[in-house]
Amino acid sequence: AQKITQTQPGMFVQEKEAVTLDCTYDTSDPSYGLFWYKQPSSGEMIFLIYQGSYDQQNATEGRYSLNFQKARKSANLVISASQLGDSAMYFCAMRETFTDKLIFGTGTRLQVFP
Amino acid sequence: NAGVTQTPKFRVLKTGQSMTLLCAQDMNHEYMYWYRQDPGMGLRLIHYSVGEGTTAKGEVPDGYNVSRLKKQNFLLGLESAAPSQTSVYFCASSYRRRGGLPVYEQYFGPGTRLTVT
């Protein structure tokens, strides 16, 4: 069965610093996709970044990058130059191949302080 | 485009009452999903649909039923609400490109906060 593990319930980072949020996954599928979503206190789910299992390069989207280490089955999110507005819950998720179902981790609450 | 909308936004039910949550999307997406989010547990899939007229069970389907009579709508029903169903419910949709390749993201609705007393 597929599984996503986020071992950091909470993280603190100072404004303008970089932070890494950990995510490990388990799957027997050769083809899969990994996602990160942000959930601010207002509750909506905001898509941040995607990494396909066959992508040769790590995904980047502005200040977000995904450190994809396939052999270690990890897909850590790196946020550079943190901003106060980055304070939120962050969820790592994996997509099942044929149904597009997302399997979510339990999330990491990031707090950015001035 | 409105994207994915959910009705209602908030609801309080008494144990044993029934209700239906409506999810609507105007993006012509084939795939639709219902998740529930509980504190400390992330999102868990309740039911999903890969096309009009089809539904399938997810991770936590007990106590819920769904219907997808129209492509743009996905209904989640609670026949006899229980306090354990107090949660925030999210609907999502996605599509596949021609050739069956999945697109990157699921589009989420704003959520419905349900409290069962």
Image (cartoon, coloured by chain):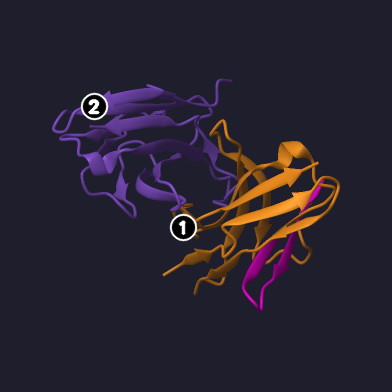
> From the image, which quarter does the C terminus of chain B lie in?
top left
Above or below, B76 against A96 in this view is: above
The answer to whether one can see residue B74 in this image is no
Find disc 1 in the rendering and name its residue. Answer: A98
Q: Mark 2 points at which residue?
A: B13
Residue A23 coordinates in the image, percent (x, y): 61, 64
**Which sits in the foreground, B38 or A58?**
B38
- Vertical arrangement, residue B82 with respect to residue A20, above or below: above
- The lab-note entry on whether marks 2 and 1 share a chain reads no
Q: How crowded is mark 2: few (under 14 residues within 10 Å), some or many (20 or more)?
A: some
Chain A painted colour: orange
Q: Is residue B76 visible?
A: yes
Amino acid at circle 1: Phe
Residue type highlighted by circle 2: Leu
Q: Which mark is residue B18?
A: none
Q: Which of marks 2 and 1 is in front?
A: 2
* Magenta: main secondary structure: strand
The colour applied to the residues of chain B in this rendering is purple
| Residue under the image location 43 percent in, 47 percent down | B39
Quarter of the N terminus of chain B within the rendering? top right
Q: Give the camera-side residue of B59 and B3.
A: B59
Q: Is residue A32 left or right of residue B72?
A: right
Q: Which chain carries label 2?
A: B
Q: What's the CA distance linking mark 2 and mark 1?
A: 36 Å
Residue B72 percent coordinates (x, y):
42, 27
Q: Picture coordinates of residue A78 (x, y %)?
A: 76, 57
